[in-house]
Amino acid sequence: MDDSKNDNSIIDDLHDADVDLALNAGQLRHTTFMSVAGTVSEIADQPPAFTLATAAMIGGLVTGRPRLARTAARVLASLAVATWIKATIKSKVVRTRPHKLLDEGHYETGLDGPDEGPYNSFPSGHTANAVAAARAIARTAPDARAPLYLGAAALGAVQVPRGSHFAADVVAGAVVGLVSEALVDAAFKAFVPDDDDDDD
């Protein structure tokens, strides 16, 4: 028995299931619900995510709420690292977005191909940003972990039926977000003082 064929078969089966899920879920992309959900999910895109975190940091500084300012700084740093990791991967990995497959019947994967939006499905930047931000905020607001994580999961999950990403892209984006925030957390613990007695 050829083990390599078995391994390839499992990988191929997972890949095919991922594509099939995206094709089936993508049938919902033009519904009113998905239009609204997709619009809401844009809060995790880079411009709004960075803008909100910056506004929170400035607000914390101006109003004398250092914990808020520090939390927002953590979010900003986590977003920056996630953006860098995500962009680095996207520049090397080609995967056609589901909507291109759905609308044009075109799909390809590989390395070092077009570094353009329609070919940059892997990983999901929206998910990376949502997870990084949720984890960073949860560090200083542990009571809000459940809604933060559920919100991040929802923002990631909606990318599949809206035709923007495959499920594997979303999972990879979540990993990018977790790794990015963990790196930032380690840096903050090493270099940024944290006064637990600060009032918000």
Image (tube, rainbow, N blue to C red):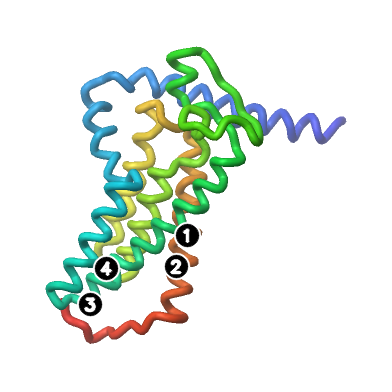
Q: CA distance from mark 1 to mark 3?
A: 23 Å
Residue depicted at x 22% and y 70%: 68
Residue 170 % position (x, y): 46, 40
Residue 148 % position (x, y): 29, 55
| 17 sits left or right of 98 in the view | right
Q: Amino acid at mark 1?
A: Ser
The mark that comes first in sequence, 1 or 4, is: 4
Residue wearing tag 4: 141
Closest to the observer, 53 or 142: 53
Closest to the observer, 199 or 120: 120
Residue depicted at x 26% and y 20%: 31
Secondary structure beneath dot 1 equals helix
Q: Are marks 2 and 1 in contact (CB under 8 Å)?
A: yes
Residue wearing tag 1: 180
Q: CA distance from mark 4 to mark 3?
A: 14 Å
Q: Quadrant of residue 69?
A: bottom left
Residue wearing tag 2: 184
Q: CA distance from mark 2 to mark 4?
A: 17 Å
Is 151 drawn above or below residue 15 in the view shown? below
Depth check, mark 4 against mark 3: the one in front is 3
Residue 184 % position (x, y): 45, 67
Residue wearing tag 3: 66
Residue depicted at x 39% and y 22%: 26
The quadrant the C terminus occupies is bottom left
Q: CA distance from mark 3 to mark 2?
A: 18 Å
The mark that comes first in sequence, 2 or 4, is: 4
Q: CA distance from mark 2 to mark 1?
A: 6 Å
Depth check, mark 1 against mark 4: the one in front is 1
